[in-house]
Image (tube, helix red, strand yellow):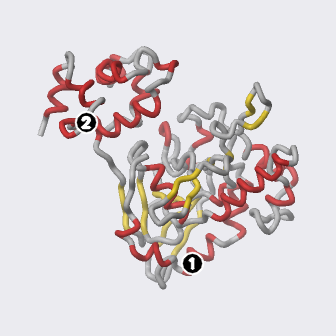
Amino acid sequence: MAKVSVALAFPWCLKGGSSTWPPVELRELMGSEEWQLRPVQAGLPRQSENRFHLDDACRSTSNSPQFSVCVKAGWCDDYSAGSGYCPVYPAENVDVRLQNGSTQMVLARSDHCMALGGNGSHMFLCPPRAPIAIIMNPKAGSTSAAMWLQLLTSLRRPRALVRHFRNNLAKGELGISEHWLFGAEGIGGRKRLRRKQRAALQQRMLFEVLIDGSTMRVAEYASKILLPPGWCIPCCAHASGRLPVVLVRNPFRRVQSWFRHKWLANKGKEPYATWAGFLPFLRYMWEHRSDANDPNGFWKRVLKRPFNMLDAARPSRQGPPPMKAATTGPIPNKFAMRLGST
């Protein structure tokens, strides 16, 4: 996991926010019943046809209702829950220990403000408690940053959801009870939401919960629970009144990280599942950058999203084994020129 040291750059985040942030108008929106219930009434999070297919229109940022916020400082912006597709791991011990000794829940994804596959429009991640607007790139510290942004939104509610889910499992029940979800500890709205709407949300929240076929138990490290959309890190359209921040990473490190996490020791990725296959993997990636050379859609489906900054890659400072793999054997001329460019 990439390290992201952002807290020291923004000392107000350590004090729970400044005296002027968030603005009253934004604070009222985030604490309102409308923010919690209108996305649910709109059917968020929508149940994707294929949870691995990023082009699914059910993951579009345009699916969420827009909330216009105008403050006395003179700026306006549009806020929403984006796609409303915000999964967390249900296992109690899936967290990370921070430098101050505390632990923090790991979010499974944080791309609900991104226009995946051309669906909707890109939006910023805009936590309520900090005047920043974040754009993240996959495999560029996105997991670490998402945990921090969730902390600046609400970590208590996702943790309470996981505890409730696990307590139900201990009693032999799979799911989120209606009494809890639509009560004071959940999102509320029992009277405003129709029975079908409540039942649909309960069902969709378990869309990525998987059952281990051998033990008939929940596969905790493969399963995810979808948060109620109002609990997602808010999205904003224009970053008005905020400091825009883009998280980037050394492109070669990014490629190396993707290979290590998604391809290394993965039998389904053979013959590219070892460090010996890293060089052929890079060559294959380079050769399939254009649609003309990619009749099977390999680049578009698998590589384009994590590797779109490869042109600037400079692996000269990287250590073995990826550096050794990338500097031994034949590398396509164009690729070698890019890697060695200054």
Residue 99 image point, x, y percent: 44, 62
Residue 320 image point, x, y percent: 27, 32
Residue 180 left/right relative to 63: right
Residue 335 left/right relative to 309: left
Estimate how packed mark 2 is, as few (under 14), some (14 to 19) or many (20 or more) residues with alpha carbons within 10 Å: few
**Residue for badge 2:** 319
On-image quarter of the C terminus: top left
Task: Pick whichever of labels 1 and 2 is earlier in the sequence.
Answer: 1
The disc placed on residue 25 is 1
> What residue sits 43% from the left and 21% below the top?
273
Of circles 1 and 2, which is in front?
Answer: 2
Regarding mark 2 in the picture, which secondary structure is present there? loop
Residue 200 image point, x, y percent: 79, 46
Residue 122 image point, x, y percent: 46, 50
Residue type at numbered disc 2: Gly
Q: Residue furthest front?
A: 101
